[in-house]
Amino acid sequence: MKKIIFSLAVIGSLSSCLQAQKSTKKESTNNKTTKTVEIDSATVRKHLYTLASDEMEGRKPGTEGMEKATQYIEQEYKRIGLKTLDSLESYRQNFEYKGIKMSNIIGLLEGKSKKDEFVIVSAHHDHLGMKKDGEGDRIFNGANDDASGVTGVLALAEYYASKGTNERSILFVCFTAEEMGLVGSEYFGKGINAEKFVAGINLELIGKEPKTGPKTAWLTGFDKSDFGKIIQKNLVGSGYQLFPDPYPKFQLFLRSDNASLARLGVPSHTFSTTPIDIDTDYHKVTDEAETLNMTVLTETVKAVARGTESIINGIDTPTRVEMK
């Protein structure tokens, strides 16, 4: 009888241990899935150096290099766990322009209580391609313009997907053919209900220190809505500052992909850091990854995450844009 009781006790003890191990494993798994992936310089560097590599051949629409860049972004969307739009068969929004087959790349992170309200995080993944002839470097790598912005999109996608607190749905979009006249973003804009889009967060040329100094960025169209003021409020105490566009004569609000949505009334603005009036690499073959500041790029993406959090979580809603 004692042997039976002892055996039962051992079995019970083993059962308890196994149950505890299962519980611990489950808790560990849950913790792993809910742990926020922080925005770090290693990830930022990986994305930037891949997208701005010679292998991408300057990412001109319709080229093999552009296809490689598109596939890289798609792979990252899939790894992160972004969904595709119901209207699309894949992450690609395919269309044709002047005989060239093109794709915007769109990934969806569904919101919770306000999933029918959208915030778009965007950048353009195209650039100028290659020189047809000549000696020396012939590749327009487009590191700052705009591999830096796409790097930000991918880093923010992974950050928000791991955080899992977005009340509003987020569309992560890499637009094509910006350099050909905002072609990809205009095509995208024609197929949406703009009233459902509460904000547009566009990233362009965010890899160099601006004239406003360290840990600062500037925003196009600052006076067009209260989007910028919301960001400034959220950045208080962070050590990072946001300023209005210091180049009003260049009309930059209308020269990046944010303009395609702003014309529809969406409070869509572009974050940038580059001192474009003195930047010697803009649209040159010298716009390579080595010329960018990884600290500036990483800190800017972090600031965008913090600055836009109240919008993404449904607390703040920027005023609509009225184009004159």
Image (tube, rainbow, N blue to C red):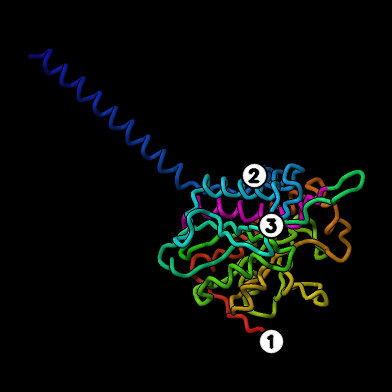
Q: Identify the residue position indicated by label 3 in the image.
A: 149
Of the two numbered discs 3 and 2 on the same chain, state the one appearing first in sequence. 2
Question: Is 283 part of what is drawn in magenta?
Answer: no
71 or 36, which is in the foreground?
Answer: 71
38 w.r.t. 169: above or below: above
The local secondary structure at tag 1 comes to loop
Q: Amino acid at mark 3?
A: Gly
> Residue 324's mark?
1
Question: How would you classify the magenta stretch by its main secondary structure?
Answer: helix
Of the two numbered discs 1 and 3 on the same chain, state the one appearing first in sequence. 3
In this view, which residue lies farthest toward the bottom?
Answer: 324
Of the two numbered discs 2 and 1 on the same chain, state the one appearing first in sequence. 2
Give the quarter of the figure containing the C terminus: bottom right
> Residues in magenta?
139-165
Quadrant of res 221: bottom right
179 or 33, which is in the foreground?
Answer: 179
Q: Residues within 10 Å of mark 1 (few under 14, many from 20)?
A: few
